[in-house]
């Protein structure tokens, strides 16, 4: 069985018929688009997607900080920059 990563679902057929209504009903949550009762795709509101991308960038930045926490370090004189 496939995992479902959304609380709202719709069929491909219903999405074709009522895209605007489904997006409005979803509010700010992802919608699983089902094909033969299996997740085929996820429809994400733009604000949700942007938050998700920002979160992934933050995770990547935190990983870089952890990797570089113990050096090596480069001595820099601000007056020489």
Image: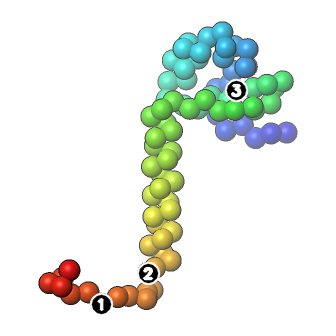
Q: Secondary structure at mark 2?
A: loop
Q: Position of residue 70 (x, y in %)?
A: 45, 86
Question: Could you tell which of marks 2 and 1 lies nearer the N-terminus?
Answer: 2
Query: Which residue in the structure is indicated by mark 3?
Result: 33
Q: Which residue is at 80% across, 30% downward?
A: 38
Question: Could you tell which of marks 2 and 3 lies nearer the N-terminus?
Answer: 3
Query: Which residue in the structure is indicated by mark 1?
Result: 75
Query: Which residue in the structure is indicated by mark 2?
Result: 69
Instruction: Identify the image's colour scheme: rainbow, by chain, secondary structure or one colour.
Output: rainbow
Q: Is residue 35 left or right of residue 5?
A: right
Q: Nearer the viewer, residue 64 or 28?
A: 64
Say few, some or many: other residues with alpha carbon within 10 Å of mark 3 (under 14 / 14 to 19 / 20 or more): many
Q: Which residue is at 69% across, 32% downward?
A: 41
Specify the label residue 36 is tagged with: none
| Whole-number angstrom distance, CA of label 1 to CA of label 3 | 54 Å
Q: Position of residue 59 (x, y in %)?
A: 50, 60
The single residue placed furthest to the front in the displayed view is: 80
- Disc 1 + disc 3, Cβ < 8 Å: no
**Within the image, what quadrant is residue 69 found in?**
bottom left
Q: Secondary structure at mark 3?
A: strand
Question: Could you tell which of marks 1 and 3 lies nearer the N-terminus?
Answer: 3
Say few, some or many: other residues with alpha carbon within 10 Å of mark 2 (under 14 / 14 to 19 / 20 or more): few
Quarter of the figure that contains the C terminus: bottom left
| Whole-number angstrom distance, CA of label 2 to CA of label 3 | 42 Å
């Amino acid at each position: 069985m496939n995992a479902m990563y959304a609380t709202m679902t719709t069929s491909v057929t219903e999405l074709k018929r009522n895209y605007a209504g489904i997006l409005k009903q979803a509010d700010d949550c992802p919608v699983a688009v089902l094909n033969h009762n299996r997740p085929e795709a996820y429809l994400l509101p733009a604000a949700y997607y942007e938050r998700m991308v920002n979160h992934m960038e933050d995770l990547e930045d935190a990983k870089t900080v952890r990797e570089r926490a113990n050096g090596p370090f480069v001595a820099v004189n601000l007056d020489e920059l």
